[in-house]
Image: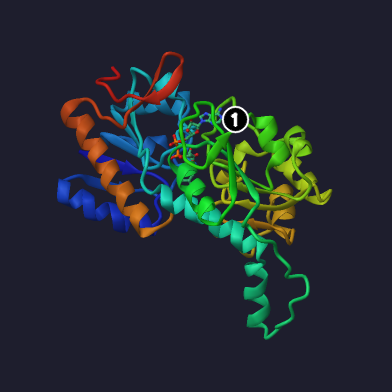
């Protein structure tokens, strides 16, 4: 089994080499992202391994199939960057549905605390021996209302963390379930009542720009927006306008709509072409991390182990519980047997 590994970073290699060697899988690492221009690199391989900012559209799927690549192994949970509908019957798409919900939920809380307690400012000030507290006033989380959109694996961990802080938790999910200490509400009510909103739903046609100008207008003045899910859940222009008008009190962004042009690369010393991103980053109440919420040792190890097992399952059994397929007009995990 030969795997063409796209968009490789040094931390990927450490984790994958360990599991691949044990299972006799040969991996060739490419730095390039997978897209129409680079797909030819997968020639001669059985599997292409892709990440969040690779683009797997019709053309890429057609080319992979033409070259005999049978598996697209996503080493991430989200699959919005893959045309799942088009892939059905052509190439097996497997993913890592959960590798550490704690990593992402803890990062969301880390960003929130950093932002509202001005830790990012204190770090810079004290390094310069500036011990002034002017402008550093924060607010207690205890007693505040947090609105969680998406109460799956990550959302639930985040809810538990928030409950530990003594917060009131309200939530919106397309498929609500029972969660202790969490009241499900309609989106409108969540916008109206939340002091903090944290996004933990997938990016779909329905959730695209779920936070837009209209949504922000319904929010409490000074609302804090946390997005550790997918960039396009938030209309970045609308968010920037909300920050400028003071309607948004702070934003914690681990993901950004146009992140694939920038995130994971070092652009220091360059002129940033994206004015919206540059303006957001320049704001004192916006914290941006570059899609690093997943990046813990535990998560990397789980990602590598599950991805390798997914590849082995498809190649030996022709099926895998982590296969994603398009059935009943929706993309879903194919837990019960073969997709095709
Ligand atoms: P999950 O599948 O366990 O939970 C997603 C939840 O969203 C489900 O409860 C589902 O019912 C709900 N949902 C689906 N459509 C919805 C809609 N239209 N409106 C409201 N809720 C809806 O997924 P998990 O593992 O909790 O991950 C959530 C998201 O986090 C992923 O989709 C991915 O985009 C993002 N993520 C980000 C990472 C990072 O490093 N920043 C790492 C891993 C995941």
Residue furthest right in the image: 245
> Above or below — where is 9 with respect to 187?
below
Placement of the N terminus among the 4 image quadrants: top left
Q: Position of residue 104 (x, y in %)?
A: 47, 50
Can see residue 291? no
Q: Position of residue 100 (x, y in %)?
A: 38, 49
Residue at left offset 31%, top offset 49%:
302
Q: Quadrant of residue 216?
A: top right
Residue at left offset 72%, top offset 35%:
212
Q: Is residue 99 left or right of residue 228?
A: left
> Above or below — where is 268 with respect to 167?
below
> Above or below — where is 280 with respect to 134?
above
Q: Is residue 77 left or right of residue 163?
A: left
Residue furthest bottom in the image: 129
Residue at left offset 69%, top offset 33%:
189
> Above or below — where is 329 with respect to 237?
above
Q: How is the image coloured?
A: rainbow
Placement of the C terminus among the 4 image quadrants: top left
- Within 10 angstroms of label 1, few (less than 14), some, or many (20 or more) residues? some
Can see residue 19? yes
Residue furthest top in the image: 328
Relative depth, front residue between 9 and 225 = 225
Residue at left offset 21%, top offset 46%:
26
State whether label 1 is within 8 Å of ligand 1.
yes
Q: Position of residue 66 (x, y in %)?
A: 34, 23
Q: Which residue was labeled with disc 1? A: 207
Relative depth, front residue between 290 and 38 = 290
Relative depth, front residue between 280 and 229 = 229
Q: Position of residue 108 (x, y in %)?
A: 54, 53
Q: How many marks?
A: 1
Question: Judging from the image, what secondary structure is the residue with disc 1 in?
Answer: loop
Q: Is residue 285 left or right of residue 314?
A: right
């Amino acid at each position: 089994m030969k795997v063409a590994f796209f968009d490789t970073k040094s931390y990927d290699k450490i984790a994958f080499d360990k599991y691949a060697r044990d299972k006799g899988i040969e991996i060739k690492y490419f730095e390039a992202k997978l897209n129409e221009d680079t797909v030819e690199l997968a020639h001669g391989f059985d599997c292409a391994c892709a990440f969040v900012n690779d683009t797997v559209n019709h053309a890429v799927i057609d080319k992979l199939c033409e070259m005999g690549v049978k598996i697209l192994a996503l080493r991430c949970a989200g699959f919005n960057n893959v045309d799942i509908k088009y892939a059905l019957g052509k190439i097996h798409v497997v993913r890592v549905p959960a590798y550490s919900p704690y990593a992402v939920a803890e990062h969301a809380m880390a960003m929130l605390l950093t932002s509202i307690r001005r830790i990012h400012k204190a770090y810079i000030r004290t390094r310069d021996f500036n011990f002034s507290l002017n402008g550093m006033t924060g607010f207690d989380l205890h007693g505040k209302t947090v609105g969680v959109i998406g109460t799956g694996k990550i959302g639930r961990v985040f809810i538990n963390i928030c409950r530990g802080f003594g917060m009131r938790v309200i939530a919106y999910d397309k498929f609500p379930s029972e969660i202790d200490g969490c009241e499900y509400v309609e989106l409108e009510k969540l916008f109206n009542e939340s002091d903090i909103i944290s996004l933990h739903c997938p990016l779909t046609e329905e959730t695209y720009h779920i936070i837009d100008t209209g949504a922000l207008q319904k929010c409490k003045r000074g609302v804090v927006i946390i997005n550790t899910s997918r960039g396009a859940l938030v209309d970045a222009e609308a968010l920037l306008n909300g920050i400028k008008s003071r309607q948004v009190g702070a934003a914690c962004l681990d993901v950004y709509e146009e992140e694939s042009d920038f995130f994971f690369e070092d652009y220091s010393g360059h002129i940033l072409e994206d004015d919206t991103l540059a303006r957001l980053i320049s704001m004192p109440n916006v914290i941006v991390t570059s899609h690093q919420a997943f990046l813990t040792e535990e998560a990397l190890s789980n990602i590598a182990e599950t991805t390798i097992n997914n590849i082995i399952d498809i190649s030996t059994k022709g099926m895998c519980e982590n296969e994603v397929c398009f059935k009943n007009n929706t993309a879903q995990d194919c837990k019960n047997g073969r997709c095709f």
